[in-house]
Every structure is written in C-alpha cells, then in structure tokens.
Image (tube, rainbow, N blue to C red):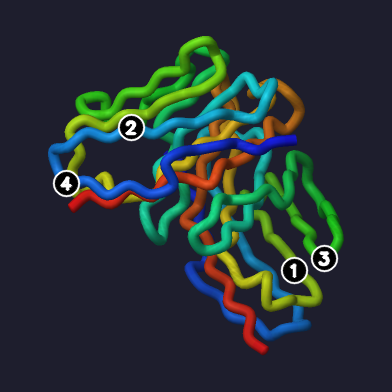
Amino acid sequence: GQNIDQPTEMTATEGAIVQINCTYQTSGFNGLFWYQQHAGEAPTFLSYNVLDGLEEKGRFSSFLSRSKGYSYLLLKELQMKDSASYLCAVRDWGNTGKLIFGQGTTLQVKP
Amino acid sequence: EAGVAQSPRYKIIEKRQSVAFWCNPISGHATLYWYQQILGQGPKLLIQFQNNGVVDDSQLPKDRFSAERLKGVDSTLKIQPAKLEDSAVYLCASSLGRDSGSGTQYFGPGTRLTVL
C-alpha cells in the first residue's frame, strides 16, 4: 500500500529553525518532493531528493534516508511569510512516475 | 516564462449540475496532471496525460468525471453530474515529461468548486 505521514500542524517562532518530518511506505520509490502551499494558492516546488543525504537551497534544506523511508524539510531563520502548508510527495517508480502526496503540515510562524 | 493557467478560478453549482474546468500547461510540457484537493488534505491524482494519451486514470471516478487533452496541449476536466463530495480545489499541473530528470511538476492556481 501507499502511506505518507506528516504531522498535521506545527508552530514555531520567527527567526527560529523548524524541522518537518515525513515518513513513507510506498510500493515504489523514485524520488521525494517537498512543496509549499499558501492558503488558497497552488503548491510551489521547494526541493527534490532522490539519493540519500542533504540538499541545501538557501534557508531551506531537505534530507532523505531511503533505507528508513524518512525525509525532513528544515527551515532556518523563519519568517512570517513561511506560514503555509508543506506537502511531502513521493514519486512512484514505474510507467507513470506519479506523485503521491501526504496530507501536508500546516506551519504557523509567530512573532 | 508563463506558468500553468487554469479557469475559472471559482465555481459554485448545485448538485446534479455539470461543470468543466480548463487548463493550459507550460509551453513544451508533455505531461499534464489533474488533481483533486479536498480541504485539509494533500492533492490526489485524478488523471495523467502524456501528450494526448492517458497514462493513469486509476483514481478518476469515470461514472461522472471525464477529461481530454486534444492536440496534446490544453486539457478540460468535466464533472457530470456533480455531487456534494466533489467540492474541492481542482489543480492542474504539468512537467516536461515523466522521464525528464526529476519530472518536477508545476501547478496552476486551481479552480475552487463548491457544490450546493
């Protein structure tokens, strides 16, 4: 079966660091994506991991461990505009390469 | 570069009525996806096109939903007849192709459908 788990909600303080975890159990794996979605808007691409390790992109970093079925998104120097939902998605192996999304983690950044 | 375009942005209909959504993907993107996102959930794939052919419609409720991508560019998604549980945001996304690098998908702004 396909299962992707993320915490439903998180709260953090402006300027702090927050880590959003994602665990997955899927029948196939061909990469993991993180998307940011502000309320009422479309998801926007943040990061992609296909090999184990850390990918850094400015204030955002994403980590993957394929053996553990685990990823996290790390947000540093939090800003108020980072308040959004963060979606973890696994790309399925096979003919379609479709994305399977988790339910998303709603992050609230407080002053 | 222009992003994925969708229309309308909002639609309110009564149950049993019909509705259609339109999507224009990023130029040159061969793969087009329609997702349904219910409030508080992640997007769920309804149908995936590669050029003008369907590669995955396993989660499309085919008794009421249909989609087409004529000429391999624009696409329309139709619901007929609508049910209350169809209230959701319908997102269109496109990518260069499922075998092109990461196959990163880029999303349009979505259509928020309310069925009364």
- Chain letter of the residue beneath label 4 in the structure image: B
Identify the residue under disc 4: B14
Give residue A68's position: percent from left, percent from top. 65, 51
Give residue B64's position: percent from left, percent from top. 22, 29
* Circle 3 SS class: loop
Quarter assignment of residue B17: top left
- Chain letter of the residue beneath label 3 in the structure image: A
Disc 2 residue type? Ala
Instruction: Estimate how packed mark 4 is, as few (under 14), some (14 to 19) or many (20 or more) residues with alpha carbons within 10 Å.
Output: some
Count how many numbered circles sit on residues in the image. Answer: 4
Residue at image point 18% right, 43% down: B83
Rendered image: mark on residue B99: none
Disc 4 residue type? Glu
Quarter assignment of residue A92: top right
| Mark 3 → mark 4, Cα distance in angstroms | 45 Å
Residue at the extreme front: B8
Q: Nearer the viewer, mark 3 or mark 4?
A: 4
* Circle 1 SS class: strand
Identify the residue under disc 2: B20
* Circle 2 SS class: strand
Give residue A99's position: percent from left, percent from top. 55, 37
Rendered image: mark on residue A75: 1
